[in-house]
Image (tube, coloured by chain):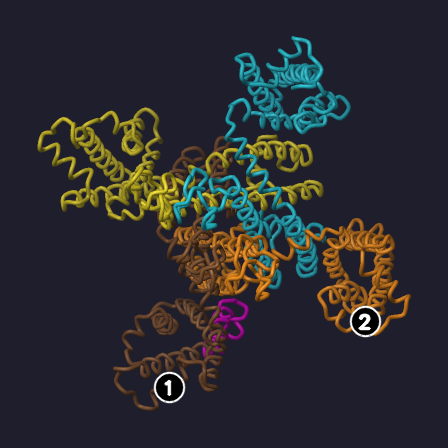
Chain colours: A cyan, B orange, C brown, D yellow
Amino acid sequence: MAGQPAQSPWRQRLHEIIYEADTPAGKGFDVTLIICIVTSVIVVMLDSVISIHAEYGSLLKGVEWLFTLIFTIEYILRLLCVLRPWLYMRSFFGLVDLFAILPTFISFLFPGTHYLLNIRILRLLRIFRVLKLAHYLDEAQTLRQALKASSRKISVFLLAVFALVVILGSVMYLIEGPENGFTNIPISVYWAIVTLTTVGYGDIAPVTALGKIVASMIMVIGYGIIAVPTGIVTVELSQAQRRQSNVSTQACPNCSAQDHDLDAIYCKYCGHTL
Amino acid sequence: MAGQPAQSPWRQRLHEIIYEADTPAGKGFDVTLIICIVTSVIVVMLDSVISIHAEYGSLLKGVEWLFTLIFTIEYILRLLCVLRPWLYMRSFFGLVDLFAILPTFISFLFPGTHYLLNIRILRLLRIFRVLKLAHYLDEAQTLRQALKASSRKISVFLLAVFALVVILGSVMYLIEGPENGFTNIPISVYWAIVTLTTVGYGDIAPVTALGKIVASMIMVIGYGIIAVPTGIVTVELSQAQRRQSNVSTQACPNCSAQDHDLDAIYCKYCGHTL
Amino acid sequence: MAGQPAQSPWRQRLHEIIYEADTPAGKGFDVTLIICIVTSVIVVMLDSVISIHAEYGSLLKGVEWLFTLIFTIEYILRLLCVLRPWLYMRSFFGLVDLFAILPTFISFLFPGTHYLLNIRILRLLRIFRVLKLAHYLDEAQTLRQALKASSRKISVFLLAVFALVVILGSVMYLIEGPENGFTNIPISVYWAIVTLTTVGYGDIAPVTALGKIVASMIMVIGYGIIAVPTGIVTVELSQAQRRQSNVSTQACPNCSAQDHDLDAIYCKYCGHTL
Amino acid sequence: MAGQPAQSPWRQRLHEIIYEADTPAGKGFDVTLIICIVTSVIVVMLDSVISIHAEYGSLLKGVEWLFTLIFTIEYILRLLCVLRPWLYMRSFFGLVDLFAILPTFISFLFPGTHYLLNIRILRLLRIFRVLKLAHYLDEAQTLRQALKASSRKISVFLLAVFALVVILGSVMYLIEGPENGFTNIPISVYWAIVTLTTVGYGDIAPVTALGKIVASMIMVIGYGIIAVPTGIVTVELSQAQRRQSNVSTQACPNCSAQDHDLDAIYCKYCGHTL
């Protein structure tokens, strides 16, 4: 880019390999990285299975250290070959890259935290660039845009749901009481969330007649409430899509008719040149 | 507002602090209030946990009384500084403010009701004003409008679901019977609601082959039925949004008619240029 | 109606009372009917509760017979005062009225069937006429129209779901086998339905690792699949609503622009009279 | 079709019977086939029920072999009477037809696999042709088109959900640990899927306070997340429908361009009157 300080050739070459996927070397690097990420996540998951840990524990620990080493080197290389390392470190992927190696080191102090290494899987979101599927990024863009546009409506909705759940939980605590599994209000609120979201584990369920009536009402409310975020996201997605889609914003200079296709040359109503 | 009787300066000042969030004092008051509400709800919730109640019961009771005292004073001040106290008392927030203090006093007569203090959390809905996020109020407005517009369709839908659930419950009672947990028809109806809303606790589940077939049909019906409120809310939200976004605020200079579309060039009532 | 044979005055009067809700007598009749329906359904439900049956069994049986008698007389009167009794008998409400009294008589032959009396609750759907809420009928109309329009798409969808569920059930039977609760293929298919519809009782749940992987895939599929009927109903509802709503189908005779409001007199684009 | 090699008359006749449903013979063949498919699937399902297998095992095995024989002959006849057998073999229905007979033969080598015969049920999807309901094929077409159009967005969504579920599973494993049923990370991930999709078996449920708080958050997230695929499918369905309903089949007489809107008066490419 113009105006940027010149980089030494090897850093430019490194940047090409690590950050781009157009050259064979770059593509090879990205594919290797994805394989490493998936393998390392699988290793962490297998290590948590007791029977596997008993037999292959030390091997898996070694592999985990190997991957952490690889990712640490990669992280340092990434810092070296970007012009503004600080900007990269604070970016979403920069933070993910950091958190993908930290837990191994921290697990010296707090054993067990190395399971948090699975945050590595977020690195997989890079996959789209490798597959060179720009279209996928477009779709992700549309999704993100729609979710962002609906975030305010969803905040309002969530606050209302939160208030509802606290009140319903308190009421159910009074009705059912500790003898029926509703041990205290926080647990009753937890039950109200489980019910309202239609998850319904069944670890706590109303026993008294009145409790069942109130629970039925909560379920029907939840039934209706689930419609709200769906409606919000659908409407926003529909608008995000329309903005992107093939309807021109241009009006006919002759008859002012709108909604012409992007490739239209003549007005479909009066035949005038657009 | 013009035509209203003049208020004494201190009541005006009080009104400014309590009901508005523009001045530093008003903002401070609102933030303090929100902290008080959240803390008091947490106190009531903790008090219901047996182990915490055993150790800190009297302390929590004291704190609860303190908050009730604070909210009672606040309620009286609110009554004092509005011009029409009666109108405020009957408003949604007026009632919430009253019910947020009543349970403590009632709990003298009926022990346990003080858990209903959690209705206080509804007071949190005031949060939007404090955060001065007028946009959030707009969004809440759109949501409320859409829900109101769809309330009639949802009533029709709920009555049909109610009839369906009573009939399905009776049928399942005949098929499964008391020996399989469907003790009586009300419980069978409760089970039908749990199933139709896809909550599925599993405290009652069909055992016989015929019962499982009917249950499968109920689930598939519920699967289809959940689509209906979602569809209703989505359509109404979409219309509420379109109405907000597509209508110009401009009035016709000739006939003063309003609600013209954004792309309108001529008044649709008198043909005059807008 | 013209061309119909004249009715005797008392049959006309009876028709007015029973089928209309405009006169005080007609309204009184309808309200009484609704109270009778609700009471009789509650009586049948209470009768199924063992403790209540033990104490008030004979009383409830008497009340049930009383209601059946009332509804039988009402059914005969309805037949008497319509011009085409046969048409009424085969109509939806005619059949409901018949099935609302039959179970009591059939319960002589097959004890227990009298619980099917709860089909009476369908008679409550008449409530809309009584409340004179023509708007509600409009809404019900829109809903019915949308559901009818989407019925073909939903049939295609249900057949596909049915095929999917049979195959998934067979696969899970092979993976988990009778020792893990998947006793036979019909029960596995039942489990697949319970999982796909996200009901999830938990009476049967996968135990083996492979079974859990397949189950996870089924859940994610079900997650996506639930979107389909919702999408179908939403789109149809949206179209049904648009057809009813305030957009004229008329095009401007001058510039051919469309989508004018129903009350528009001049084209909003060119100012020409519509 | 022109240019194709002439077929012997009996192969043409066979083709007519097997692949078309217009002649009485063709219709008879198709109806027989559907009955055979349904019966054979029911036979396989019944055979898996232990009590039925004990009594009628050998009979059911015989019937299964009979159906496999019939379907094998049918498969060979289909291969014989098409012009390009290889193309048919690799088509969707060709593969289904093959897999519908293979398991019986394979079950010699691997006992139990004959339950996979239930893949036969996919052959039922042919039912639409038999019922001559071209409309149903249209609807299926619209559905498939909408699902295809949304497949990319859903891939992005599924990858994000997958990453979320792995991370949440790891976190819950750390919080709850093996002593509360979260035996290892793969099982915790399975639990996260069960919760996020609102299935909620309840075979594993959080026990600790922190675990319940995190679980509540997951449920609320899942509640919001379920809105995304629904929104995607709804928007795509809506567009697929609009495309079908809004596009004229008329070509421009001047430039032969197609896909004009139904209300178009002039060709949008050359300005000629349509």
Rendered position, A114 above or below C51:
above
Instruction: Residue type at mark 1: give it.
Output: Leu
> Which percent across, then down, holds residue D192?
59, 38
Q: Is residue B177 visible?
A: no
Task: Give the residue at mark 2.
Answer: B83
Q: Which residues are magenta?
A: C39-63
Q: Which numbered circle lies on residue C53?
A: none
Going by the picture, which residue comes out furthest to the bottom?
C9
Q: Residues within 10 Å of mark 2 (few under 14, many from 20)?
A: some
**Badge 2 element:** loop
Instruction: Residue type at mark 2: give it.
Output: Leu
**Badge 1 element:** helix
Q: Is residue C92 visible?
A: yes
Q: Quadrant of the N terminus of chain D?
A: top left
> Which percent across, then down, holds residue A191?
64, 51
Task: Give the residue at mark 1.
Answer: C14
- Look at the image and say whether residue C57 sits in the magenta stretch: yes
Residue at coordinates 48% horizontally, 68% vertically from top-left? C136
Rendered position, C222 above or below C103:
above
Rendered position, B149 above or below A96:
below
Along the horizontal axis of the image, is A101 left or right of B236? right
- Choose top left, top right, bottom left or bottom right for residue A143: top right
Q: Nearer the viewer, residue D44 or C233?
A: C233
Residue at coordinates 81% horizontally, 55% vertically from top-left? B21
> Which percent across, then down, holds residue C59?
49, 78
Q: Nearer the viewer, residue B238 or C102?
A: B238
Residue at coordinates 35% horizontally, 80% vertically from top-left? C78
Q: Nearer the viewer, residue A177 or C250?
A: C250
Going by the picture, which residue comes out furthest to the left?
D9
